[in-house]
Image (cartoon, grey):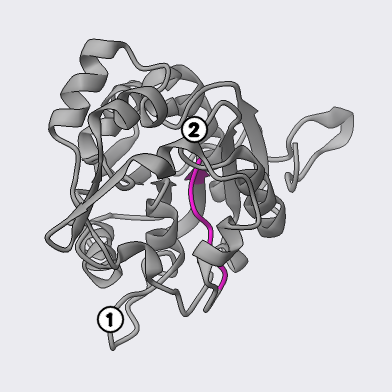
Amino acid sequence: MTGAAVAAGGTPAYAGVPPLRNIVLVHGAYADGSSWGDVIVRLQAHGLSVTSVQNPLTSLADDVAAVRRILDLQTGPTLLVAHSWGGTVISSWGGTVISEAGLHANVAALAYVSARGPDAGEDYGALAGRFPTPPASAGIVHQGGFAWLGEETFLRDFANGVERSRARAMFAVQGRVADTLFASRTTVAAWRSRPTSYLITSDDRTTAPELQRFVAERMRARTSEVATGHLSMITRPDRVARFLLDAAKRGAA
């Protein structure tokens, strides 16, 4: 456990603290907000108010704007959570006027699930190039200014561990990503000023686990690791829900 406050006896200092009551979930590329569905029902069972953003995936500015619209509706301190590409969105801003997502006044803490975590102004593609190339990268299809994953790659690499019929349904509704999306750079790093947690997926074939570990350590995040693929919210929803409940308690401490 990295970066957590620990009380006498080895118990996290925030263990008995009521969690943040609001959670906003941000999905990644090649997916949509429904990818969080299994985790949402578990968090709602704990009495939390949960909202899943629908990112347009057309630009960083558009995705940040979508997140801010949801954050504006929250009634109090909020845990802002990202999967995959969503990590750039919650860390950053997009557009000609500063409009940070992760630095929104309602955001008390951040949680990253197999997510990008760029530093301000960083070429994240160059950073990722220092680590093993994940298999999913070979299956990206480009056409008409947008990109998506081919079916074989989606099922084998992006959705590894997901029951096949469900993975095929996800493939049918995958979000198309603007070709320029991943080249976007941030001007801030919200994780530098918010309590941050990171869940690493060690069987990930879309985002290299080695890159995830580097990002989590750089953030000084409270880090957990689970042996599953990129879509842990589907393959291990109980584990992800527990991770987010813990992050919500840490953010409220």
| Quarter placement of the N terminus | top right
For this view, does 190 lie left or right of residue 231? right
Which disc, if any, is residue 95? 1
Q: Secondary structure at mark 1?
A: loop
- Choose between 224 and 24: the one closer to the eye: 224
The CA span between labels 2 and 1 is 31 Å
- Give yes or no for residue 118 being in the magenta stretch: yes
Q: As shown in the figure, which amino acid type bears the numbered disc 1?
A: Gly
Relative placement, left or right, of 153 versus 6 is left
Give, as a single range, the part of the protein colored magenta: 112-119
Residue in the foreground of this view, choosing between 121 and 253: 121
Image coordinates of residue 41 in percent, x first then y, are: 29, 23
Position of 35 relative to 111 (above/below): above
Whether residue 193 is visible, yes or no, is yes
For disc 2, the marked residue is 205
Q: Is residue 203 above or below residue 173?
A: above
Work out whether residue 21 can be spotted. Answer: no
Q: Give me the residue at 60% from left, 62% from top.
A: 127
Query: Dot 2 lies on which element?
Result: loop
At label 2, counting other C-alpha atoms closer than 10 Å, the crowd grade (few under 14, some 14-19, many 20 or more) is many
Q: Position of residue 205 (x, y in %)?
A: 49, 33
Q: Measuring 21% from the left and 12% from the top, which residue is drawn there?
A: 165
